Amino acid sequence: MAADLTRPTASGSGAGGSGALAGEAYQAFAVESRGIELVPDDQRPMRPAELFWLWAGAIWNVEFLVYGALVVSFGLSFTQAVVAILVGNVFYVFLGMASIQGPEAGTTAFGVSRASFGINGNRVPSLFNWITQVGFEIEGLVLVVLVVEAMLSHEGVTSGTGIKIVLILFAVALQFVMPLLGHATITRVLRYLSYVFIVLFAVMAALVLPHVDLGSYHKSTNWEIWTTAVVLIVSAGGLGWTENGNDYSRYLPRGTSRAKTLWAATLGAAIPSILLELLGAAAFIVSPKATAVTGVPASFASWFFWPFLVLALPQLFAINSLDLYSSGVTLQALGVPVKRWGAVIIDTIVAGAVTALVIFKGSFYTDLSGFLDYIVVWLAPWFAIVFVDYLLRRGRYDRPSLFAVGGGVYWRNGGVNWRAMFSLLLGMAAALMWIDAAFYVPAYTGPLSSATGGADFSWVLGILIGGISYWLLSFRSVPAEAALGSGGVADRG
């Protein structure tokens, strides 16, 4: 069946971004109508420096301070924690690698993913991603509520059920605004917030570092536990953001240097992540309470309590905006027939409802660690498949076919690429073979992890098995596919 390139997709837009969306101005502080639709070449005013500051503004965040403290709380020595942080953050290059398709294809991460999986097959990883993004949104909203509760408690106000409900509604309502406005607003706001957060980091470092007494800290653990700490850093960092990469790079002009795109995303995220996690590790030495956002001020001077928590709130809303924006366009990739603003509303309601459950359940930080451990099971092979597909087709995407229902280059067998589906499932099975999630719910330890004393290389195995299997199954078919695409992007070498 021939591709119907003018037929509306599930997101309610034409395949080529035609109609009203084709002339939509890229403007901050105005509601962005465009969702997963293709971004026309004349609607891409972004520059690599803006991509750098977007990621920097998101990652200069108290969450990453807590991740650094959590690493030490596993029982690592300070030196072991530093090595785990440095090694884990090298893999922000994955975020860079997952950002270079956006300028080429002109669509979101799970719009690009259709080239690998097919429009219908892509619904499976899209569902996994939607759950993951909503999970990160819930994390941010819970932290906002906990921060405000700490402020009230500091002033002697006990947060009963009624106050908690009001705080949840407040957090949800405020969080809704920036993702609703969209890409241009997020880019502008995060750039300027990053300047404020850099100053905050400098003040925190000045308050913490003079009190770090490494001579009194004598803990150390085995290499198996160290690998689990690395999983947390990789999952919360470079690998954990790959499913967002092209959502934000797609507004870069198609002629943008791939190297500039890669390094803008990689360094914009990696630099603040490394600095904050190292500071978090140091803060834990001063006070073990640093494993919770509300406990971090215990590592500082008492006067810094209010400045820290007041500035933590916009940080948390800022990073959550990326997740909520991405979950909305992922909902469209999943096939839900809704506009982008409608998807934001749906995701906000879902995240708010689950946030209430987490707040009243009361085991947030355990749930968070388990969440970060398990998401790599699907994320690692998905990332590998999409990037191997990109290499095999040498960056050439038939953009209209990404939206062609019932035809086009990527329709294949009823809209499913079974090679990619098999590789994803195989990679997930491999990841589960070497995962150590014994202390989470559901508790599970893979046979390879049991055989190696609790080591966790789930993300490594997921990437290798998912990527290699897809290459073996597709090294002939994908290049042939790329040659068929009349609307593909010319390879720049």
Image (cartoon, helix red, strand yellow):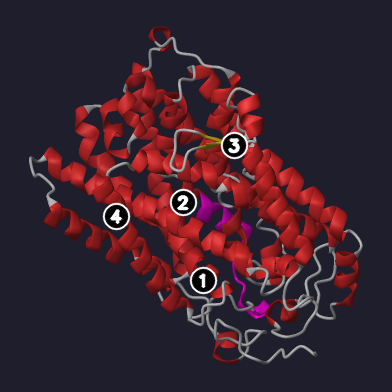
Say the numbered circle drawn on residue 57: 2
- For image coordinates 33% across by 24% down, the residue present is 288
Residue that badge 3 annotates: 435
Say the numbered circle drawn on residue 273: none
Res 226 → quadrant: top right
Please, what is the three-letter code of the amino acid marked with disc 4? Leu
**What is the spatial separation of the Cα atoms under label 3 and label 4, in whole angstroms?**
27 Å
- For image coordinates 37% across by 26% down, the residue present is 283
The secondary element bearing badge 1 is classed as: helix
The secondary element bearing badge 4 is classed as: helix
The secondary element bearing badge 2 is classed as: helix
The secondary element bearing badge 3 is classed as: loop
**What is the spatial separation of the Cα atoms under label 4 and label 2, in whole angstroms?**
29 Å
CB contact under 8 Å: marks 1 and 3:
no
Q: Which residues make up the magenta segment?
A: 40-55
Asked if residue 187 is positioned above or below residue 199 in the image, the reply reads: below
| Mark 1 surroundings within 10 Å by alpha-carbon count, few (fewer than 14), some (14 through 19), many (20 or more) | many
Please, what is the three-letter code of the amino acid marked with disc 1? Leu
| Mark 3 surroundings within 10 Å by alpha-carbon count, few (fewer than 14), some (14 through 19), many (20 or more) | many
Nearest the viewer among 42 and 292 is 292
Please, what is the three-letter code of the amino acid marked with disc 2? Gly
CB contact under 8 Å: marks 3 and 4:
no
**What is the spatial separation of the Cα atoms under label 1 and label 3, in whole angstroms?**
28 Å
User: Residue 43 in magenta?
Assistant: yes
CB contact under 8 Å: marks 2 and 1:
no
Residue that badge 1 annotates: 331
Q: Is residue 258 visible?
A: no
Res 433 → quadrant: top right
Asked if residue 5 is positioned above or below residue 179 in the image, the reply reads: below
Say the numbered circle drawn on residue 357: 4
